Image (spheres, rainbow, N blue to C red):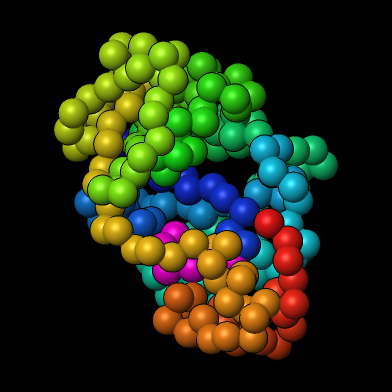
Amino acid sequence: MARRIGILGGTFNPVHIGHLRAALEVAEYMGLDELRLIPSARPPHRQAPLVSAEQRLAMVELAVAGEAQLRVDDRELQRDKPSFTYDTLESVRGELAVEDQLFLLLGWDAFCGLPSWYRWQELLEFCHILVLQRPDADSEPSEALRDLLAARSENDPLSLAGPGGQISFIWQTPLAVSATQVRQLLAQGRSVRYLVPDAVLAYIQAQGLYSGQTDS
């Protein structure tokens, strides 16, 4: 029987409840066998985080411990080059059966930036794309993306058929939390409890992360 695998990538700097709630909601709604959180080692579209890839990986591992549908995939940390989503999808797809379904989760803002990604028009060869759209989304897709949606969109994400090739939207519970907000609060010496899992907060405190930092 075909497996259903989801992928959610990011810097996770640090991982917070917005990441985790989105991942869990999609995993449950889509009936995924597993959803993999993949920390990027060297993000190609932004400055490298001051917190190391190994520390960010450790926080994600702590965050999903005990959650059966969520797991951590460290393959981007094993590559000595920028973390291109194309390479990650190609690698994951190579480990799956032909009939297995692969779903790439993207926030609306990330999706709107897709045309700037490496080999972006080939991503659907490996997967379906699930766009996580919130009521407060205000970015506008480019003409190239509108053309792609016209050709590849499916209204009902539960109707996505085959191993990949289509795009659908899933509405998300709006949680007003971001990694930038968490870092700013920590830099100011303020509490981030309930914005990150307790185990992640304990790790941040033990490692002395983000205190006084002003990184992006």
Q: Is residue 103 visible?
A: no
> Looking at the image, is 65 positioned above or below residue 126?
below
> Looking at the image, is 102 positioned above or below residue 72?
above
* Residue 18 place in picture, x, y as percent: 41, 63
* Residue 206 place in picture, x, y as percent: 70, 88
Residue segment shown in magenta: 14-19
- Of residues 201 and 182, the one drawn nearer to the viewer in this rendering: 182
* Residue 171 as seen in the image, left or right of residue 61: left
Dividing the picture into quarters, in which one does residue 70 lie?
A: bottom left
* Residue 119 place in picture, x, y as percent: 60, 19
Residue at screen point 59% across, 34% down? 85
* Residue 34 place in picture, x, y as percent: 39, 53
Residue at screen point 28% across, 52% down? 172
- The quadrant of the image that shows the C terminus is bottom right
> Looking at the image, is 141 positioned above or below residue 139?
above
- Of residues 178 and 13, the one drawn nearer to the viewer in this rendering: 178
Residue 66 is a magenta residue: no
* Residue 125 as seen in the image, left or right of residue 33: right
Q: Is residue 35 visible?
A: yes
Q: How many marks?
A: 0
* Residue 208 as seen in the image, left or right of residue 93: right
Dividing the picture into quarters, in which one does residue 181 lie?
A: bottom right
The residue sitting at the right extreme is 80
* Residue 192 as seen in the image, left or right of residue 157: right
Residue at screen point 57% across, 50% down? 10
- The quadrant of the image that shows the N terminus is top left
